[in-house]
Each structure stands twice: as structure tokens, then as C-alpha cells.
Image (cartoon, rainbow, N blue to C red):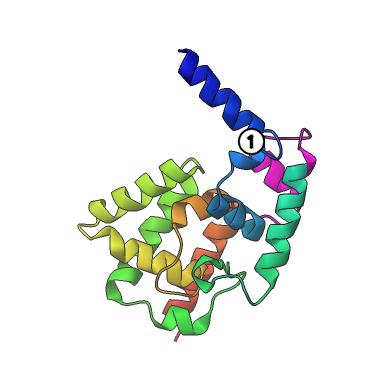
Amino acid sequence: MVAIEDAKTALELSLISPLEETSKVTFRHLAMLAQTKSNDEDVWNSLGLGGNVAQSMIDRLERMRTWIQSRHFPDELRITILEEPDMEAVGRLDGENLAILPTLIEALEACDWDASSIQSTISNTAKSQDMSPRHAYRALYLCIMGTERGPRLPTILAELDQSAIVNLLRACLDESVEP
């Protein structure tokens, strides 16, 4: 027990600054929030920090936003959420994607809007249509991000407005059936 206490004290003394909430938020999660939330207050609310945010966390988010806007930010972490259908992406929807999209839209509109519920809804909708969930995910990526794949979608969707996403999916479906 004494050895554990000694090690803990040694760690605390070796830190430049004390352990704060900055160490509790992963790099990937902060990068995702900085890209999906337009203002800092929404980021803090998503993290459950409310009005009690340490200056080190404010500085970390500011540096993250600056890095995201630079050409040095890794493309594989870059998130682009469409505001309206991308006609090229909608044109790449195949038969399975189009078949599952109406049911998927209804299910997403009715589900609880958290990452776990969204993931279950997507998987269960695909299974109810006797399809692989990859058809549902491909349709969602094409409609929401304009790409065939990307970062973990349920986590990203949970940070976005549910009705905006559902409306975007409906618009994509409407565009795909127009002559």
C-alpha cells in the first residue's frame, strides 16, 4: 500500500500541471466535437462540463479548432456533414441502399438520439430487411457525408441535430427517385 501511495505521489509531483478534465477527453473525441459543434458552449455541454470549464480545456479546444482548419489536420479524421444532398453521392446509392433508406429514415426519426441507440437502430433496421448493416451504413455515409465510409457514424450522429439528419436523408431519398 505504501508503494502505491509513493508511486501516486511521484506521478503527481512529476506533472507540469495537475490532472484535469483535459486528460479525460480523448484526442479523437475532442476533434469530432470541434468539427460537429459550431460553438464552444455546445462542446462543453456535450462533455457535461456546462459553465465549469478549466482554462486548459478552453485552450485545448482553441488549438484543436486551429489545427482542424489547417492543411496539417489528417484527412482520415476530417468530418464533413452535408447540409443538402450531394447529387454525385446520391447517384452512387445502389439498389440495396435505396431499398433500406425509407425504413432507416423512419427508424432514425423514432429512436433515442444517442450513439448506442443509433447503432442499434441501424443494425436492427438492416436485419429487419434481411440485409447486412453495411448497406445501411453505406447509404448513411453517402447521404450524410458524401463518402462511402468514414469515422464512426453513430457517435457523430449523436452530436448532430436529429431532425436535420432525418430531413437530409429524406431529401436524398427524394433526389434519388426524381426522374
Q: Exactly how many numbered labels are in the figure?
A: 1
Viewer-closest of 175 and 94: 94
Q: Amino acid at mark 1?
A: Ser
Instruction: Check the picture and name the quadrant holding the N terminus.
Output: top left
Residue at the farthest top position? 1
Q: Residue furthest left?
A: 130
Q: Which residues are magenta?
A: 37-55
Magenta region includes residue 40? yes
- Can residue 178 be seen in this snapshot? no
Q: Which quadrant is the C terminus positioned in? A: bottom left
Q: Which residue is mark 1?
A: 14
Vertical arrangement, residue 3 with respect to residue 160, above or below: above
Residue occupying the point 71% across, 37% down: 17
Q: Is residue 131 left or right of residue 121?
A: left
On the question of residue 60 being in view, the answer is yes
In which quadrant of the rendered view does residue 84 lie?
Answer: bottom right
Judge whether residue 97 is colored magenta: no
x and y percentages locating residue 176 in the rendered image: 43, 78
Instruction: Name above or below for residue 102 compared with residue 154.
Output: below
The structure residue drawn at horizontal position 79% and vertical position 42%, both measured from the top left corner, is 55
